[in-house]
Image (cartoon, rainbow, N blue to C red):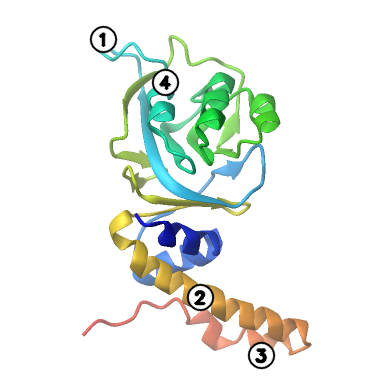
Amino acid sequence: MTPDLLERLRRLDTCSVSDALDKLGLPGAVVGLVPLTIRSRVAGRAVTVKLGAPLDGLPKRHLGAGAVMASQAGDIIVVEHRGRIDVSGWGGLLSRGAVKKGVGAVIVDGACRDLDESLEFGLPIYARAAVPVTARGRVAEHSFNEPITVGGVAVSPGDLVLADGSGVVFVAAGAAETVLVAAEAIYAREQLMAAAIERGDPIGEVMGADYEDMLKQETRA
């Protein structure tokens, strides 16, 4: 992934990218992940963590620690926690370590804890809920930097991640250029429409039938 792709992604919002994914018939938008600390637009490369039930033979490593150590500045740690909200999949010490590594954000498909600490550190965390219950003895790390699933969306290490106040979208690395081109076109068009509304054009004319059809998938020859 080139820095240029990430810079282009940062200039967009999750709604434009989600619309582009719809237009292209691709998955990527996840329902139910919301900002729990800082509402900040963040974009980066995915470093993944897979959590599950404690099993014999798993590495004796605290969940998330390997991903923190493997992260580069600006990366986003993405945790498969299978939507669990009864037990934490991320905590304050991990947030402290992530900030030291320059991690851009953490996304947990489930619950996390120690949100006051993460807020103090200025670390954006997107998750389904907050809970004080510890993972110790209840959840274990099965792997990190391997393919995971978040809200039904397949996420691989190195995929693009964008998160803002509307939620989270993932873009497969191999489709990044195609998705960004489509998202940039949608974003630019909506900016023109916003300007038309601001200058007083009737909203019914601005948001007419053409707007409703703008996400139809193009017929391929």
Q: Position of residue 201 (x, y in %)?
A: 74, 90
Q: Earlier in the sequence, mark 3 or mark 1?
A: 1
Q: Earlier in the sequence, mark 4 or mark 1?
A: 1
Q: Is residue 137 visible?
A: yes
Inspect the image, locate mark 3, and give the three-letter code of the amino acid beneath it: Glu
| Front residue of this view, candidates 182 and 153 | 182
Inspect the image, locate mark 2, and give the three-letter code of the amino acid beneath it: Ile
Do the residues bearing badges 4 and 2 touch, measured as CB atoms within 8 Å?
Answer: no
- Compared with 206, 86 (above or below) is above
- The residue indicated by pointer 3 is 205
Q: Residues within 10 Å of mark 1 (few under 14, many from 20)?
A: few
Task: Give the residue at x 57% y 24%.
Answer: 96
Task: Give the residue at x 48% y 73%.
Answer: 184
> In which image quadrant can residue 61 be found?
top left
Dot label at residue 63: 4
Task: Give the residue at x 59% y 24%.
Answer: 113
Q: CA distance from mark 4 to mark 3?
A: 53 Å
Task: Give the residue at x 68% y 32%.
Answer: 119
Q: CA distance from mark 2 to mark 1?
A: 49 Å
- Compared with 49, 41 (above or below) is below
- The residue indicated by pointer 2 is 186
Do the residues bearing badges 3 and 1 touch, measured as CB atoms within 8 Å?
Answer: no
Q: Residues within 10 Å of mark 2 (few under 14, many from 20)?
A: many
Q: Residues within 10 Å of mark 3 (few under 14, many from 20)?
A: few
Left or right, residue 215 beside residue 145: right
Dot label at residue 56: 1
Residue farthest toward the left in the current orientation of the protein: 221
| Front residue of this view, candidates 47 and 34 | 47
